[in-house]
Structures are given as C-alpha cells and as structure tokens.
Image (cartoon, rainbow, N blue to C red):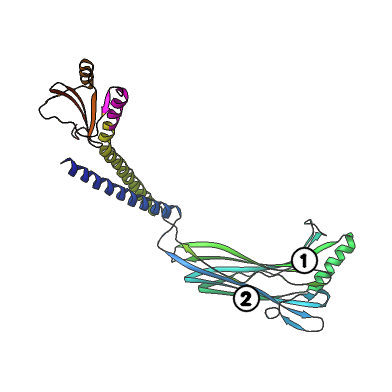
C-alpha cells in the first residue's frame, strides 16, 4: 500500500513539474509579446540604396566609376556627375509623403588635426514633397559636383587666413518620409541619409560613397489597450498557475522525503550519543527461543544495558527504513525499533 502511494506521489510530482514548466514557458511568451508590442498584423519592408558617380576630366574624358573605380588627378577633374537611387518596397499598400534634400558643403580641418575651421554650405536644393499610394517607391535623382569651384573656395580661405587645411567636399542626401498603413493601422515617420565625400588633395583624390545595401525589416501593429489588458490578465493567470504548481510540487517532495529524513536523523543521533555502548551487527540477530520485549523509549533499552552489563546490538533491517537495537539478557531480548513513521501520522 505504501509502495503504491509512493508511486502515485512520484507521478504527481513529475506531472506538477511538467505543468509548471509549460506555464512558465507561456508566461514568458505572453509577457514578451506584451512588452514587444507584437501582434498578428504586420507589413514587411525592404529598403535598398545606391550612390554612385562618374568623373568628367578637363580633356572631356568620361570615367564611369561603376566600371573603373580609381583615384583621379585632382586638377584634371572638371565635374563629378553623381546620382542616387533609393527604393522602398512594402508588402501591402501604404499612403506615403516623402521628400529629399541635397546639401553640398566644403569642410576643412586644421592640417593634421580634427579641429574643424571651415564648414560652409555651397549648395542646397529646394525639397519637394511628393505623395504616393502603393507598394513601391523608387526615388532617383542626379546632381553635379563642381569640384574646381570648391577647390577655389578652399584656396581663397587658405589665402585669407594663412592656414593649412585637410579639406573635403561632402554632399548629403536626406530622404524623409511618413507613411500610413491600414494593414497595421499605424503611421510612421522615418528618414534615410546618404552621402558622397571627396577629399581635396594636392595630387589625387577618390570619391567615397556608402556601400550599396539592402535592408529588410517588419513593422507590427500596436496593441490596443484592450489587447494589453488581455495579455496582462493571461500573464497574471499563468503566474498564479506556475506558483501554485511549484508550491504543490514542493509539498509533495517534502511528503516523499520527510519521513525518511526524520528516520535518518533519529538513527544518527542514537548512534552518536550511545556509540560507546553500541555494537553494529553484520547479520540479523537470532530471536529463536527468546522472549522479545519491545520498549517504547531508547532510555529503557539503555537502562537494560546498564543493569545487565550487555552491549546494545544494532542492525539495520531495511536500509533507510527500519533499524533495531537489541540487548540480550539470559532468554530475553529487549528491542527498540526505529522506522519511518506511518504516512498517516
């Protein structure tokens, strides 16, 4: 009966651990879902951008940088024809307003330092806001960079202030857009910045452009207050279930091991306290033709030991469950038994 009950307790314990683990997993899942504002509605967005240029020299030679990327003799450059391409692709229709600004400036640091002493905007276009509805935005434009003019501005600055510069021309393309999507019931504003940098060196130069890239990401609909309340209620319910399962598992675990622990503690205390009077037996003592008298307290057995001047024999009948202490005197055996308490107790 006890063995069957122990099996049932073990099955119950394993079941509680599994239930607590499952509850913990879903608690984490819904809590993370609530914190990350995730929902089942989303749109996928792919963004790609390219900046490139061609070089026109004073002798009317035209170099396509996409074919022949190299350095150019600074004084031989007449014009740098630059273009950019920016594409946004949505997985569902959006309404979008967008514009872009191209700003060209010359920047100069004091020779060999990071101290900026020249920062002058030379070119800036007038932004035009455009509206669009659909899934793909393909924005392309071109502009010329009159490098000789910028070199002249730098030379005039050096002549006026008598300083040496590490100068460069920088053109920044800032694309700003705002879109709204019925698919996720959400509006969003964002921007993209592209640039081309041309160092102004005495001998040669090479424009620096960002590497063409494709970036894919998703936008999710925001949770409503009702959704947030629902997720919170689910999280609280799962938290309560997890705590209940864990506490119940602890109680079952204590039930399984409590009696064995009490038994072991009592046995060790007796063996330690009366070690000078106890003899450990290898085999079960023989009780044939002997009157067996069970005593209620170990002190009674100790008194019998003192009166009869006989040792207290110790033998563990069932490991971790039942042990006996015996004092033999003539045809009598005084026995004290230590065992796991009945589960009903």
Residue 334 is tagged as none
Neighbours of disc 1 within 10 Å: few (<14), some (14-19), many (20+): many
> Looking at the picture, how far across and down is residue 329, in whole percent?
16, 21
* Residue extent of the magenta highlight: 264-279
> Looking at the picture, how far across and down is residue 54, in whole percent?
72, 78
For this view, does 344 lie left or right of residue 235? left
**Residue visible at 23% across and 43% down?**
9
For this view, does 78 lie left or right of residue 310? right
Residue 212 falls inside the magenta stretch: no
Residue placed under numbered mark 2 in the picture: 140
For this view, does 134 lie left or right of residue 12? right
Q: Main secondary structure of the magenta part?
A: helix
Q: Residue 33 lies in what quarter of the image?
A: bottom left
Residue placed under numbered mark 1 in the picture: 168
Number of labels in the image equals: 2
Mark 1 vs mark 2, CA separation in Å: 25 Å
Q: Earlier in the sequence, mark 1 or mark 2?
A: 2
Find numbered disc 1 in the image and state the secondary structure of the residue it sits on. strand
Comparing 277 with 255, the one in front is 277
């Amino acid at each position: 009966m006890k063995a069957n009950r122990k099996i049932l307790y073990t099955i119950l314990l394993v079941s509680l651990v599994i239930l607590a683990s499952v509850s913990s997993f879903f608690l984490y899942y819904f809590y993370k879902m609530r914190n990350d504002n995730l929902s089942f509605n989303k749109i996928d967005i792919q963004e790609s951008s390219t900046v490139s240029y061609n070089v026109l020299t004073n002798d009317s030679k035209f170099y396509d940088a996409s074919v022949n990327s190299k350095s150019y003799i600074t004084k031989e450059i007449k014009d740098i024809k630059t273009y950019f391409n920016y594409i946004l692709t949505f997985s569902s229709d959006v309404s979008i307003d967008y514009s872009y600004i191209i700003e060209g400036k010359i920047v100069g640091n004091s020779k060999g330092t990071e101290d900026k002493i020249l920062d002058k905007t030379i070119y800036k276009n007038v932004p035009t806001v455009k509206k669009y509805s659909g899934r793909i935005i393909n924005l392309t434009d071109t502009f010329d960079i009159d490098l000789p003019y910028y070199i002249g501005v730098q030379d005039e600055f050096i002549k006026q202030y008598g300083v040496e510069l590490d100068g460069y021309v920088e053109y920044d393309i800032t694309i700003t857009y705002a879109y709204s999507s019925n698919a996720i019931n959400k509006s969003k504003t964002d921007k993209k910045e592209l640039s081309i940098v041309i160092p102004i060196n005495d001998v040669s130069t090479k424009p620096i452009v960002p590497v063409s890239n494709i970036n894919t990401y998703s936008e999710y609909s925001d949770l409503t207050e009702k959704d947030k309340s629902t997720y919170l209620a689910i999280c609280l319910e799962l938290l309560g279930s997890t705590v209940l399962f864990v506490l119940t598992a602890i109680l079952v675990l204590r039930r399984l091991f409590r009696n064995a622990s009490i038994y072991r503690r009592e046995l060790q205390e007796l063996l330690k306290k009366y070690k000078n009077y106890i003899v450990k037996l290898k085999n079960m003592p023989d009780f044939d033709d002997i009157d067996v008298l069970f005593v209620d307290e170990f002190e009674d057995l100790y008194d019998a030991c003192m009166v009869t001047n006989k040792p207290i024999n110790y033998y563990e009948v069932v490991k971790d469950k039942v042990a006996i202490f015996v004092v033999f005197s003539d045809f009598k055996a005084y026995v004290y038994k230590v065992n796991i308490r009945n589960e009903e107790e």
